[in-house]
Image (cartoon, rainbow, N blue to C red):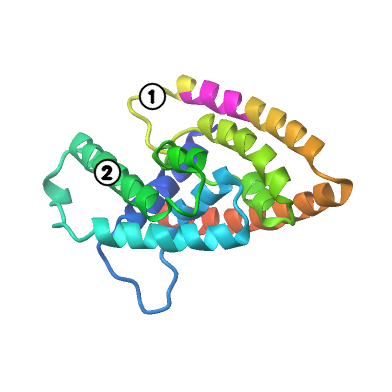
Amino acid sequence: MSRTTFKIALVLAAVAMVAGLSYAQPPQGQRRFGGMQAEFLCDALVLNAEKTAKVVAAYQEATDQVRQGSQPDFQNMSQEERREWFDKIQKETAAKLKELLKDQLSEAELNAIEPVLARRAMPDADLRALRQIDLKDEQRAKLQPLALKLVEAMVSGFPRGAQDADREAAQKKFEEEKSAFKAKAAEILTAEQKTAWETKTQEVQKEFDEMRSRMRSRTQ
């Protein structure tokens, strides 16, 4: 991963995290950026459209409840203090989300909420596309542990003193895990589903590229 790409990824991850926990209220009907975190969780769990809608709604409710506290003075906080605050809020949000979804998700899915949200990584086009194609419940059940394993290998957007070499090694490991994931996932899909997955991935990747382009223009 080049330094330029890393900087863009860092900014995007920061935007997703901060916006998801923002105290500002969006205009009525406007989709919240916080949904990015909820969608990332749905990707990791390979949820269908019905469960995705419930998770996104529950995430919004959870963040609304967590936001009811006083807003910290970010300008007078050190970088480490900000990270600690984000960690605290992230855990509170995950705990509230688990409570709200206890009747909607399995125990394994509920236990995955906190570690997945804690990754603070960029969404992956293949994962996003996979859950959006027509899958049977038994296929989703087989794909879920594979997707969660891939998420574990994702490079966090909030490095804690990581050197470029360390991040490059982590990125290489992720790419290896990604190749293994795609090969195993393909074994679960039918020929028609694999074609649909490839097509949907291209569509999603285009959307992600456009988002990155907009963010890149803001950082220049």
Can residue 116 be seen by looking at this rendering?
Answer: no
Where, by quadrant of the figure, is residue 171 drawn?
Answer: top right
Where, by quadrant of the figure, is residue 111 drawn?
Answer: top left
Q: Nearer the viewer, residue 8 or 183?
A: 183
**Numbered circles on residues, count:** 2
Residue 95 screen position, x and y as percent: 32, 45
Residue at 66 percent of width and 42 percent of height: 141
The magenta segment = 167-175
Judging by the rendered image, the residue that carries numbered circle 2 is 86
Q: Dot 1, how many residues are within 10 Å of its Cα: few (below 14), some (14-19), or many (20+)?
A: few
Outermost residue on the front side: it is 103
- Check disc 2 and report its element: helix, strand or loop: helix
Q: Which of marks 2 and 1 is in front?
A: 2
Mark 2 residue type: Phe
In the picture, measured across the screen, residue 88 lies left or right of residue 163, that is left
Residue 218 screen position, x and y as percent: 42, 57
